[in-house]
Amino acid sequence: MYSKIMVPVDLAHADKLEKALRVAADLSRHYEAPILYVGISSSLPGPVARTPEDFAKKLKAFAQAQAGERGIEAEARTYTSHDPARDLDTTLARAIKENGVDLVVMATHAPGAPEYLFASNAGYLAQHAPVSVFVIRD
Amino acid sequence: MSDDQSALIPDGEADVIDTEYEIGQDNIQPQIGPFGLDIHNPVFLISGLAIVAFVLVTLAFQNSLGPAFSDLRNWLTGTLDWFFLSAANVFVVLCLVLVVSPLGKVRLGGTEAEPEYSYSGWFAMLFAAGMGIGLMFYGVSEPITHYGTSVAANAGSPESWAPLGGAPGNIAEAGKLGMAATIFHWGLHPWAIYAIVALALALFAYNKGLPLTMRSVFYPIFGERVWGWTGHVIDILAVLATLFGLATSLGFGASQAAAGLHFLFGLPDNTTMQVVLIIIITGMALTSVVAGLDAGVKRLSEINMVLAALLLLFVLFTGPTMALLRGFFDNLIAYAEYLPALSNPIGRADDNFRQGWTAFYWAWWISWSPFVGMFIARVSRGRTVREFITCVLLIPSLVSVFWMTVFGGTAIHEVVNQGYQAVTDADLPLKLFVMLEQLPLHQISSFIGIILVIVFFVTSSDSGSLVIDTITAGGKVEAPTPQRVFWASFEGLVAIALLLGGGLTALQAMAVSTGFPFTIVLLLACYSIVQGLRSERQVVKEAEAQAAE
């Protein structure tokens, strides 16, 4: 049914994404579809990492940990953005196109600051993406 | 935008500073109504409260504060003029040394970093943020004013405002001096101030891995203390300087747009009109910041550049074209010739000019510098220091020379060769439109002029809000959008409060008073830059040596 699942990850709040991560892993095993974890970094130092290179390393480690823990096939890809507060949704839309993704699983309610950002991003993707978007409520 | 946004930007060697500090560790995430915020605790609260208090006090005592503000401004520029002039000279010299020294090879973002923006997008943004409204406001008025005071019979007397004693009665020499003095204020010195701040911020963010706020620049001096109150004070100063600097130019913009609308369409030119304009334009700035850096700020800056280029070419071709083209080179020579005398901080007789113009400008540029510098830093990753200074110092200075030549040169030509006195007699904000009236199709060109003033206003306000938002979020660029909205609105409010509470004098006084402490901050930053670049070179060399083995 699905051949590649994309899961956008906010590494700063990865602990709050458990539900979406679990659902994505279940679907991945069910359809035997690998998961692509996508992270978006600014080129500036941020809370997660101080260089984009470092950010990419952390995301890769995250994907490997997920693969081991949940018994799935996983890869990671980091995108950099000039203004992550505002162009996250368009960057994710591009990630879908560039990676041949056919299902997106994403959380909409990581509590705290980025909460409404996530909501608006999932909403944007559900509305504009050419593929299925599974929006996971907390 | 370059295409490499989609891929990871390679970093290569860089000397990342080892610190325990985590970006955002001092942030709090309060929930206000439906909005979640993510703000740096003391910096946001203190600068926010200080500004709210300032707006209230200014509005409450509007009539009695005017004289106090103008006294403050006169005292600062009158007593400390030597300090402002010397500091600006230090910045120019340091920039020029960096261009030719081996430190110029350091690349912002590490040896392998690639530029994120094309030259045109980058240049449009830094120019629109850096000078914008000022070029519209002073492009005609400043050369014509300096020319007028220089040629007047009383030039050189203590009451005269002429630069360097002027050239009484000598039309050719006074024109030359007028242009040189204007270019002096818009050339190497202001851009050197911006370049220093921008370079410092970019270096410590991209190469050293510290958050994009002013305090990071002081890591070599204060060490871990920059994360405590030392750093809070520096960041709060940066926020206040940015806000008052921006409000000053928003005030100029509003007064010029109102004057232009009155001149063209007979709309009332009063404080109410200016307040309405500030509100409308702040609304446009809000839309732009909410759209984001690429979709809002960058796009508007590019539109702005196109409009400005059109107006420039229009004046060039309908004005005295050949004289202007020759004038460009003559003015460059005049600038070089008068530069040593104009930048000399001591032992001069032209008090009015040196204190009222030069010292005021330097303080104003410096109060703008955290904002312009941070904005330039944000879009400059991947450039080498040499490339960076060439594009932030030398090219904009040349563009300023050309702009001033075309607008000021045309106005002086109108006065001298056509006996057109109106442009000399008009008020400062109106001079641009009065000059355009002598050229064909002036209704269209004046209208474009007003639009440009307004769009420049918007591009300064939106990029300024992004910058203040990042500082008050402790260097986080992904802070929630309501914070940008808050700061953009407050810039408008501060501009309105200052206009009502004492007019432009109040605006200028605030810009100058925040500029002074920041000058000290910038002098310290010069030391940090040199330290930072040297350690960067060291690491790159070691890595090269290892690779060779």
Image (cartoon, coloured by chain):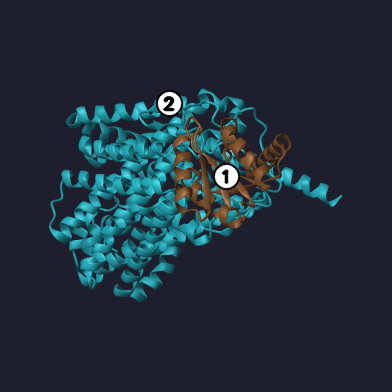
In the rendered view, tell whether residue B49 sits above or below residue A36. above
Of residue B385 and residue B210, the one placed in the foreground of this image is B210
> In which quadrant of the rendered view does residue B486 lie?
top left
Q: Which chain is brown?
A: A
**Seen in the image, is A83 located left or right of residue B406?**
right
The location of residue B240, given as percent across then percent down, is 39, 34
The location of residue B96, given as percent across then percent down, is 56, 52
Q: Chain of mark 1?
A: A
Q: Give the secondary structure at mark 2.
A: loop
Q: Which residue is mark 2?
A: B30
**Seen in the image, is B396 located left or right of residue B7?**
left
Residue occupying image coordinates x 78% and y 49%: B544
Q: Which residue is mark 1?
A: A40
The location of residue B216, given as percent across then percent down, is 56, 34
Residue occupying image coordinates x 22% and y 33%: B67
Q: Furthest residue to the bottom?
A: B322
Q: Give the secondary structure at mark 1.
A: strand
